[in-house]
Amino acid sequence: MSEPAGNLNIPAGMERGAADKQRLEMSNSHQRAVSMGALSDMQHQTTAMELIGLQIWHAWILKFYFPLCIAIIIMSCMWAFIVAKRSDYDDPSGSWQGCLLNADYVYVPLNSTITQIGTQIKSATSNLALCFIGEVQDQTCPQDCANALITDCLSGLTPPKVQASDIQLPTGHFMDGFSYLGIQCIIFSSIAHGVLFRALRHPSWLQSTIALMIWFLVAMFTYYTVGPILPVPNGINSTFVSYLIYTSSYDKFRDFNNGDNHCHYALRVAWAYEILILLVCTTVFIGVILAIYAERIRYKSPNKPAYTHLKYTQIPLMLSGLAAISYVFFLAAKITSSATELAAISNYDVPNSQAGKGFWYPSIWYPFAVPTLDITTIVGICCVMSCIRGYTIQSLSAFRLAFMCSVVYGLSIYPGLVGAYNFYDFNNFYSDEDCKNYFLGANTSVFGYPSDGQAQAYCQSFRMSIVAITTMCFAMHAIAVACAVCVHANVNDGRGSLEHEVYDFEAATAFHDVASERGSFAVAPKPLLSRANTNQGAPAPATPGDKTESGHAAPQLTSVYTSNPLST
C-alpha cells in the first residue's frame, strides 16, 4: 500500500546535494562580487592614470610657458628703459622709438591760434579803414587827413610775425602701459597655471578652477578696473584689447612727421611683444581645456565623492551668476568706449595749421591710462569665485570668504557710484540730445572729436556701464546676506569645511614615474591611490585564510590599493 506523498522520506544524500548546490551558488555570488570589485578597481586605476597623464601634459605646457615669461620680462624692461631715456628718442625721423613715444602727446596749437588772432586783427583794421574812407567820401573830413590816419595809425595795427612752438601735453601712456601690460599678463597667467597645477592633484578644486581660469583668460585681454565707473577714455586703463586695436593698422603711422619716420619697424617690435603675450594667453587657454577634460574624467569615475549638501547654497550661486553677467556688460561698455575713441582719433585728419579750439593731436595719439590692479575689482571677482567653489564642494569656509569679499566690495564701490550718478544727472544724460551734445560740444576734443554716430556710441557705453555696475552692486549686497544666512544655518552642523576625495594626490608615494610604468602597468600595477576615504567602491576582497561555506578556500584578489598615501 502506498504512503501519502507528504510522508515520503527524502534520502539523506539528496538533502546534502541541495545544500551543496546552495553553498555553490553563494560561492559563485561572492566570486561575482569580487570580480565586480576588480572591475571597479581597474576603472579607479585608469582614472588615476588619466589624471597623471594630464599632469604630464601640463608640465610640458609649463616648460613652454616659462621661457615666454622671461622674454616678456626682458621686453617690458626694454619699454621702461626707452621711457626713461625719452629725450634721446623724441625725433621720429632718427629712431623707431620716437613713433611710439610721440603717441603720448596732444598739442595746444599756438601757431594756428596766433594766426587766427592775426587774421581777426587784419579784418578789424580793414573794417576801420573802410569806415574812414566812407567818411571821406561823405566829405566829413579832408582827403589828406583820412590818408594820413590810415597810413600812420592803422598800419600799426598789423599783427607782428610771431613764431611759437606748440605746447606738448603728455596725456597718454603708451610705453608705460605697454611695459606694465606684460607684467600683468605674467601675474594673471602664473596664478592660472598655479591653480591648475593644484587642481590636477586635488580634483575637488577642478570646477572652481575652471571658472577662475576663464576669468584670468578674459582679464589678460580686457582687465578693466571698476573705477572710473563711467568710461571716460583718458580715465580708462589700457588693456591688451586696446593695444591690439591700436596696432592693428599701419595707416595712422604712415604720414606721421610728414612721412619721415621709422614707424613700420616700431610696429614690428610692438607686434613681437604682443605675439609673446598671445602665446602666454594660449597656454592658459590650453590649461582651461585640460581642466575641463580632467573634470570630465573625475565626473565619470565610479568613485567620485558625494558631498554632504549644506543648506541655502543655491541662492549665493545664482547671485554670483548675476554679478558675473553684470561684469561682462561692464567690460563691454568700456571696450565700446575705447574702440570708439580710437576710431575717432584715426578719423581726425585736421592739419595743425587749421586746428581750432581745444587740443590738436596726430592720428597716432594713444589716450588711455596705465593698467593697474584695484581692490574693488579683485574682491568682486574673489566673491564670485568663492561662491562657485562653496557650491561645487559644499564648503562653508568658501561662503565665509564670499561674505567678507562682498562686504568689502560694497564699502569700496559707493564713492564711485555716487559720483557717476551725480555726473549722469547733472549733464542730463537721460536725454539723447543732451547726451550727444556733451560729446560734441566743449568736451569734444577730450573724446577725439567724435562724429554724431560716435557720440551716440559714447552715450550707450556710459548708460550700459552705470546699469551694469548698479546691478553688480545689488548682487554683491544680496550675496553678503545670502552667505550670512548660509553660514549661520550650517555653522553648528559639525561638518568639515573641506574634504579630501579619493583622487587627491597628497603624498609623495602617490606619484610614480608614469613614463616608465605605463608600458608595464597592466602587468604589474603599483599602488597609486587609496579609496579608504570614500564611502563608495567595490566590496573588499577576501583575505588569506577565508573559506566559503563549502569549506573551500575563498578566491583571492590581489588589490592594487594596498597602501593609503593620504595617511602618510
Image (cartoon, grey):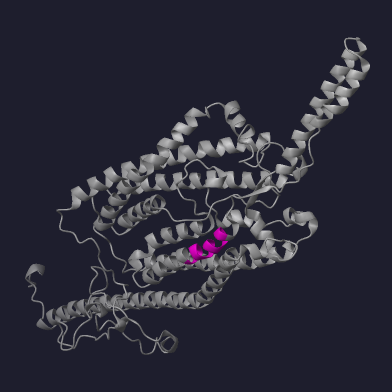
Residue placed most toward the observer, 307 or 23: 307
User: From what the image shows, is residue 346 above or below residue 123?
Assistant: below
Determine which quarter of the picture holds residue 319.
Answer: top left
On the image, the x and y values in percent for residue 531 come to 26, 74
Quadrant holding the C terminus:
bottom left
Write the start and end of the magenta stretch as one range.
Answer: 176-186
Residue 368 visible (yes or no) = yes
User: From what the image shows, is residue 374 above or below residue 293?
Assistant: above
The stretch drawn in magenta includes residue 372: no
User: From what the image shows, is residue 213 above or below residue 551?
Assistant: above
Could you tell whether 193 is left or right of 303 in the image?
A: right
Residue depicted at x 62% and y 45%: 341
Q: How many labels, in total? A: 0
Quadrant holding the N terminus:
bottom left
Residue placed most toward the observer, 179 or 113: 113
Residue depicted at x 52% and y 29%: 427
Could you tell whether 282 is left or right of 121 in the image?
A: left
Residue placed most toward the observer, 271 or 97: 97
On the image, the x and y values in percent for residue 24 come to 21, 80
On the image, the x and y values in percent for residue 281 come to 53, 65
Determine which quarter of the picture holds residue 552.
Answer: bottom left
Residue depicted at x 59% and y 49%: 171
